Image (cartoon, rainbow, N blue to C red):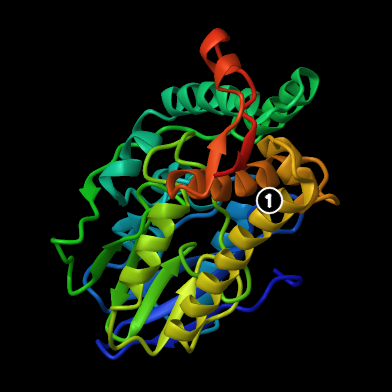
């Protein structure tokens, strides 16, 4: 815990006490947060880290800090619910361990339920869809295999868990309201507790959350994400938003506007570079031009990010597929895009 941010306490207008507990969720030092909610019905843990490396020990150390530094008389078995904001490993990979230690019921949005209850199936299906996408994006065969190996290696330690609760917009739980915010992840939810919003990875204080094409996973994609941002602008009464990573956000609407502008710049950048190239480009070509310095797993993230924006431009009529004859003749050729 010495190299991590300190556990912080936030109080909501509803009287809830919300503890933000840091964890190193990936070996590269990537920090995420789990939230403990007290005095809002049963003690509830929101997200459990990745379960990888020091993630779960960091979470347990955070719970110790809640007891010994903040004076909460809370044992592990007092935690009765675990809410998962979305089905990405850095948020749910540690759930199985925490269920074993707490006996808590697990809640998640219905669109991410299958990821938790039948994880092995989800990985197999997602890996197949990703492989098809990488081929269509124009990634060379040897590079595709390297990216697939990295994608699948990080997911081998996760175990399926039973889901007991559906987190639904129409069904508040003990005064907590849920907002379905697809885009970054299919079943992502934000949770409002009085004047505090747990914004998960939908809205981060510094980073524009990662986007992937809907052609890989339904209910992701930039179109869904932008729609969800517009819906988030309608949420009233938020004093502070607490995200899955990075700093608290005290100007939620202002931060949403910044994220919207960032994606608009990326869309325009793709159009500009294609105009300058004046020739058909694959998603791989566009990704290498936009993100030339990415290495290792970040290459895959860059290909997905560029692909999400290309997909959006194609859906909205700004791009066309150039190699239609090849597309008709072959099973899954790399798509070549031109300005419409």
Residue lying furthest left? 170
For disc 1, the marked residue is: 26
The answer to whether 243 is drawn above or below residue 211 in the figure is below
Residue 161 locus on image (x, y percent)? 37, 36
- Quadrant where the N terminus sits is bottom right
Image point 42% across, 62% down: which residue? 226
Mark 1 falls on what kind of element?
loop
Q: Who is closer to the viewer here, 180 or 323? A: 323
Horizontal relation, residue 53 to residue 276: left or right: left
Image point 62% across, 37% down: which residue? 337
Q: Is residue 107 visible?
A: yes
Q: Who is closer to the viewer here, 48 or 134? A: 134
Residue 40 locus on image (x, y percent)? 25, 76
Image point 59% across, 33% down: which residue? 155
Determine the image quadrant of residue 153: top right
Determine the image quadrant of residue 263: bottom right
């Amino acid at each position: 815990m010495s190299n991590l941010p300190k556990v912080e306490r936030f109080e909501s207008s509803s009287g809830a006490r919300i503890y933000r507990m840091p964890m190193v969720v990936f070996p590269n030092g990537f920090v995420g947060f789990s939230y403990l909610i007290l005095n809002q019905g049963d003690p509830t843990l929101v997200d459990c880290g990745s379960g990888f490396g020091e993630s779960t020990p960091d979470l347990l150390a955070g719970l110790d800090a809640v007891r010994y530094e903040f004076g909460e008389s809370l044992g592990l078995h007092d935690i009765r619910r675990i809410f998962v904001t979305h089905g990405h490993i850095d948020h749910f990979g540690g759930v199985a361990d925490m269920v074993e230690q707490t006996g808590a019921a697990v809640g998640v949005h219905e669109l991410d339920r299958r990821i938790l209850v039948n994880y092995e199936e989800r990985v197999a299906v997602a890996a197949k869809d990703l492989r098809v996408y990488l081929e269509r994006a124009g990634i060379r065969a040897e590079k595709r295999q390297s990216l697939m190996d990295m994608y699948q290696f990080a997911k081998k330690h996760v175990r399926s868990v039973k889901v007991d609760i559906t987190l639904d917009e129409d069904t508040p739980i003990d005064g907590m309201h849920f907002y379905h915010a697809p885009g970054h992840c299919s079943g992502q939810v934000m949770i409002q507790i009085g004047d505090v919003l747990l914004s998960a990875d939908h809205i981060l204080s510094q980073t524009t959350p990662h986007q992937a094409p809907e052609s890989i996973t339904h209910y992701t994609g930039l179109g869904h994400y932008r729609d969800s941002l517009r819906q988030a602008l309608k949420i009233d009464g938020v004093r502070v938003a607490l995200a899955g990573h990075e700093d608290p956000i005290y100007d939620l609407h202002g931060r949403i506007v910044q994220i919207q502008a960032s994606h608009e710049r990326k869309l325009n950048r793709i159009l500009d570079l294609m105009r300058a190239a004046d020739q058909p480009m694959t998603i791989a070509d566009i990704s290498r031009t936009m993100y030339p310095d990415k290495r290792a797993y970040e290459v895959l993230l860059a290909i997905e990010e560029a692909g999400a924006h290309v997909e959006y431009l194609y859906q909205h009529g700004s791009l066309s597929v150039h190699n239609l004859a090849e597309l008709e003749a072959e099973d899954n050729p790399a798509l070549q895009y031109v300005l419409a």
